[in-house]
Amino acid sequence: MNHRSSNTHGTNCVAVACLTEAICIRGNKNPDAGNLIAFPGEFGVLVHRVKLGEPRG
């Protein structure tokens, strides 16, 4: 299963692929930069924190 998400302006897209035992996430602006791989429980925490605006780089 693949899913692509974007903001209302379509400028910040990510691609998400659900693999057998993990979830693979990559940014569409620079797909060659690599992937973030998370296990299902970790992915749920990541989504929750992003919705809260917690992760800051």
Image (tube, rainbow, N blue to C red):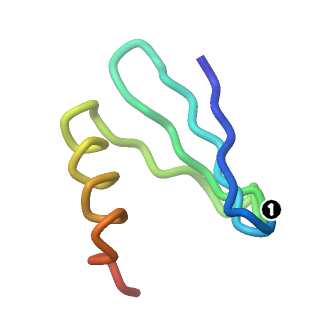
Q: Residue at x 75, y 56 (%)?
A: 28
**Does 22 sit left or right of 28 as displayed?**
left
Between 45 and 37, the one nearer to me in the picture: 45
**Does 33 sit left or right of 11 as displayed?**
left
**Quadrant of image for the C terminus:** bottom left
Across and down, in percent, residue 56 comes to 36, 85
Asked which quadrant contains residue 21, the reply is: top left
Q: Residue at x 33, y 76 (%)?
A: 53
Across and down, in percent, residue 2 comes to 64, 25
Please, is residue 51 above or below residue 20 in the view? Answer: below
**Does 45 sit left or right of 24 as displayed?**
left
Local secondary structure at mark 1: loop
**Does 14 sit left or right of 38 as displayed?**
right
Across and down, in percent, residue 37 comes to 42, 43
Please, is residue 25 above or below residue 32 in the view? Answer: above
Q: Residue at x 66, y 58 (%)?
A: 27
Residue under pointer 1? 10
**Quadrant of image for the N terminus:** top right
Across and down, in percent, residue 11 comes to 79, 69
Number of dots carrying numbers = 1
